[in-house]
């Protein structure tokens, strides 16, 4: 580590990376703009872009990164760079800088990925590709820079892994932020879902002369909904949780009553409003898991920001923002 050499991009540091694990899954993507139009203006633009792609935009110790590297970083997702304003691209470049500094630190400390970690990562990519209907992606061909980002993720975990939240912090947060834990009116809802309107009308007629036991039996035996094994119980919801057309029907019901037939893209529904819960304040114990998550996230951000700031003071690095393919905007502008 070149701890005695401190070089910074034009007197300002890019913004500190403030994110919780997985730390660098926050990549907004952009596609390369390559100036492929016709005519003299387009040809000139293409020449300019070609020169820009080869210009250095970041140096970290002995490593140099060019516009093409930043574009590859952006190409990790399908976001079009041309659709993003300069301010958004600037913040993404800040994250790019932070990642490369963390990557250098990981390498200097001898942190490496095991073969098992790489295999697990490739397996996860394969599952994600199947879920996203991308059968052409090979398990053995990860996206460019994927292992580097995984190494940064591993290093980041090592930095923040000792972060803890104690009971006193949870209680203090609860007392200072009780308004965040006020629950709106909530309802427990059940449903019977069938595939034809004729069958739904038949079920509704059967329910007119019976009560909850018949509803539960029909939901268990005939409903096509994923909650049929739970006798139709969908769960507890508050306003905004369900599609608006369904909410309009359900919230208008009295407790213990069933709705008329409601058609949707999934089929034909008959809803039952099982129970209404009035607005209430969560207890500390009920709110504790969410509070712990919030405090932990903030602590991890703070720990990582401080660590990254230390790296920027000790490593030799420079951001050459004047060479970027867009006009970089600093946070203080």
Image (cartoon, rainbow, N blue to C red):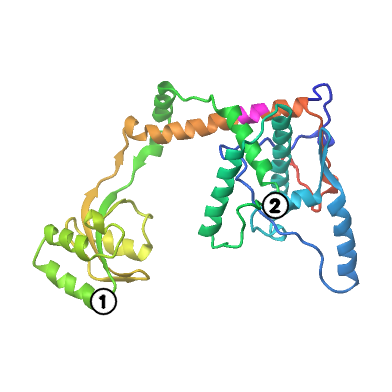
C-alpha span from label 2 to label 1: 48 Å
Give the residue number, with chain letter if any, for mark 2.
Answer: 74
Q: Is residue 165 above or below residue 229?
A: above
Counting every numbered tag in the picture gives: 2
Q: Residue at x 68, y 50 (%)?
A: 88
Q: Residue at x 91, y 71 (%)?
A: 40
Give the residue number, with chain letter if any, for mark 1.
Answer: 197
Q: Is residue 306 magenta?
A: yes
- x then y, percent, for residue 42: 86, 68
Q: Residue at x 71, y 43 (%)?
A: 96
Q: Is 297 positioned to the left or the right of 3 in the image?
A: left
Main SS category, magenta section: helix
Q: Is residue 319 magenta?
A: no
- Mark 2 or 1, nearer chain start: 2
| Quarter in which the C terminus is drawn | top right
Q: Is 17 positioned to the left or the right of 251 in the image?
A: right
In this view, the residue in front, 167 or 331, is 167
- x then y, percent, for residue 332: 73, 39
Label ID, residue 113? none
- x then y, percent, for residue 163: 53, 25
Magenta-drawn segment: 303-307
């Amino acid at each position: 580590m070149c701890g005695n050499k401190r070089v910074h991009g034009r007197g300002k540091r890019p913004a500190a990376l403030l994110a919780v694990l997985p730390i660098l899954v926050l990549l907004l993507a952009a596609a390369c703009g390559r100036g492929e139009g016709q005519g003299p203006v387009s040809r000139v633009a293409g020449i300019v872009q070609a020169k820009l792609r080869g210009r250095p935009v970041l140096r970290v110790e002995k490593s140099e990164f060019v516009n093409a590297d930043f574009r590859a970083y952006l190409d990790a997702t399908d976001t079009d760079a041309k659709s993003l304003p300069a301010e958004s691209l600037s913040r993404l470049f800040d994250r790019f800088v932070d990642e490369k500094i963390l990557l250098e630190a990981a390498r200097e400390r001898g942190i490496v990925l095991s073969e098992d970690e790489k295999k697990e990562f490739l397996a996860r990519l394969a599952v994600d590709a199947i879920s996203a209907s991308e059968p052409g992606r090979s398990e053995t061909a990860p996206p460019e820079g994927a292992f580097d980002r995984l190494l940064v993720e591993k290093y980041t975990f090592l930095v923040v892994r000792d972060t803890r939240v104690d009971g006193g912090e949870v209680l203090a947060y609860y007392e200072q932020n009780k308004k965040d834990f006020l629950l709106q009116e909530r309802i427990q809802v059940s449903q019977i879902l069938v595939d034809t309107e004729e069958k739904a009308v038949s079920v509704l007629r059967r329910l007119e002369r019976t009560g909850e036991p018949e509803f539960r039996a029909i939901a268990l035996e005939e409903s096509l909904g994923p909650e049929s094994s739970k006798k139709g119980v969908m769960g507890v919801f508050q306003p905004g949780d369900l599609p608006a057309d369904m909410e309009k029907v359900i919230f208008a019901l009295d407790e213990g009553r069933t709705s008329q037939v409601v058609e949707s893209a999934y089929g034909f529904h008959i809803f039952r409003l099982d129970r209404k819960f009035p607005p209430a304040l969560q207890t500390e114990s009920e709110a504790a898991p969410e509070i712990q998550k919030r405090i932990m996230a903030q602590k991890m951000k703070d720990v990582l920001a401080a660590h990254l700031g230390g790296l920027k003071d000790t490593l030799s690095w420079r951001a050459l923002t004047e060479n970027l393919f867009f006009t970089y905007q600093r946070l203080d502008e």
